[in-house]
């Protein structure tokens, strides 16, 4: 019975957060305030385009956890609209397709780093 209670408490997001999933199966708690941002509006639109509405209640964003963590880092740092626009311009195709294609780009890849 205690195990069931633990599993149940894990599935409930913290106050002021919602749960979103990434294509690699990672569960992320996202502050509700982020949902109204340009970045998350785009992610949610892309999710709807790729996966449609599901009846299971889960929202899966069309990105892997690394992309989502980077996006949340940008939002935590209150980056400029120009930086958000540049980030979103890389989202022309769903993130997991872009990540699968990346190895074919060669060794001259640039990686954006966002530290807390």
Image (cartoon, rainbow, N blue to C red):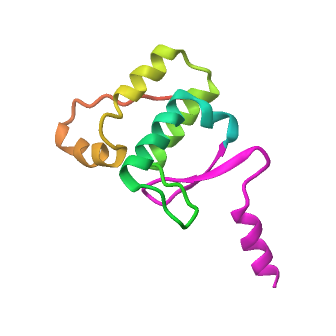
User: Which range of residues does the magenta coloring cover?
Assistant: 1-30
Name which quarter of the figure residue 51 lies in: bottom left
Q: Residue at x 46, y 35 (%)?
A: 42
Q: Position of residue 65 (x, y in %)?
A: 48, 48
Q: How many numbered marks are there? A: 0
Residue 115 appears in the picture as rendered? no
Question: At 77% from the left edge and 66% from the top edge, which residue is drawn?
Answer: 9
Q: Does the magenta segment cover residue 6?
A: yes
Q: Is residue 57 left or right of residue 93?
A: right
| Camera-nearest residue between 65 and 34 | 34
Farthest residue in the bottom direction? 1
Please state, as top left, top right, bottom left or bottom right, where the N terminus lies in the image. Answer: bottom right
Front residue (pair 41, 106): 41
In the image, is residue 16 part of the stretch drawn in magenta? yes
Percent coordinates x, y for residue 83 in the rendering: 46, 18
Give residue 50's position: percent from left, percent from top.
36, 51
Residue 80 sits in quarter = top right
Q: Residue at x 64, y 28 (%)?
A: 76
Residue at horizontal 62 percent and vertical 23 percent from the top: 77
Relative horizontal placement of residue 76, taking residue 65 as reference (left or right): right
Could one spot residue 14 in this view of the protein? yes
Residue 91 sits in which quadrant?
Answer: top left
The quarter of the image holding the C terminus is top right
């Amino acid at each position: 019975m205690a195990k069931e209670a633990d599993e149940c408490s894990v599935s409930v997001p913290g106050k002021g957060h919602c749960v979103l999933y990434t294509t690699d199966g990672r569960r992320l708690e996202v502050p509700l305030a982020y949902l109204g941002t340009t970045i998350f509006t785009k992610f949610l639109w892309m999710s709807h385009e790729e996966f449609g509405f599901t009846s299971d209640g889960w929202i899966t964003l069309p990105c892997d956890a690394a992309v989502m963590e980077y996006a949340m880092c940008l939002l935590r740092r209150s980056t400029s609209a120009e930086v958000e626009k540049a980030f979103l311009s890389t989202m022309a195709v769903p993130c997991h397709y872009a990540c699968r294609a990346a190895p074919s780009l060669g060794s001259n890849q640039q990686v954006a780093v966002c530290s807390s």
